[in-house]
Image: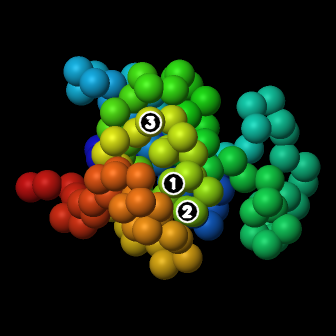
Amino acid sequence: MALAHVASLRSEDPFRKVGAAALDHDNRVIATAYNGLAPGFVAPAGFWEDREKRQKFMLHAEVNLCSLFKRGEAKIVATTTMPCTACMQTLCAYGIKEVYYRDDYQQSDAPEIAETYGVKLMQVADFPHA
């Protein structure tokens, strides 16, 4: 979860900064990512001012994370916010078996999707640990 938090600090989004980290089957870190714009895209002046308008262009941390490994390579994903419905679907498609998150996200069907696909979805609310 600490790596996901640090990755979130790289996000340019002034409203919501989300980070994610992936571990392989030997518990080695294989990727970290954050929510942001497509690589190489330079936001025009005023882009960040209207959240509603720019939201559709933001790539979620989980999508960016999955772009860094092949299906079946990662076993565990930690993310600072519960995955949205589409991101949970993506994580399942990539064969992720365990997803840990810090902050709740009420607009997500992630719990139902995780239960259907047999993916462990668990909140780690007491992060950082003392």
Could you say whether the residue bearing mark 2 is in a helix, strand or loop?
A: loop
Q: CA distance from mark 3 to mark 1?
A: 11 Å
Residue at 62 percent of width and 57 percent of height: 86
The reply to whether discs 2 and 1 touch (Cβ–Cβ < 8 Å) is yes
Give coordinates of residue 59: x percent, y percent: 69, 47
Q: Are marks 2 and 3 in contact (CB under 8 Å)?
A: no
State the image coordinates of residue 8 (x, y, percent, origin top left): 48, 48
Judge from the rendering whether residue 50 lies leftward or rightward of residue 81; answer left or right. Answer: right
- Vertical placement of 125 versus 23: above or below? below
Tell me if mark 2 has few (under 14), some (14-19) or many (20+) residues whose alpha carbon lies within 10 angstroms of its own: some
- The image quadrant of residue 51 is bottom right
Q: Secondary structure at mark 1?
A: helix
In the picture of the structure, the residue carrying the numbered disc 3 is: 95
Residue 65 visible? The answer is no
Q: Secondary structure at mark 3?
A: loop
Q: CA distance from mark 2 to mark 1?
A: 6 Å
Q: Which residue is mark 2?
A: 84
Give the quadrant of residue 101. bottom left
Inspect the image, locate mark 1, and give the three-letter code of the amino acid beneath it: Met
Q: Is residue 106 left or right of residue 4?
A: right
What residue does disc 1 label?
88
Q: Considering only order in the chain, which callout, 1 or 3, is on the residue closer to the N terminus?
A: 1
Q: Identify which amino acid the numbered label 2 is placed on.
A: Cys
At 14% from the left and 55% from the top, the residue drawn is 129
Question: Which is more foreground, mark 2 or mark 3?
Answer: 3
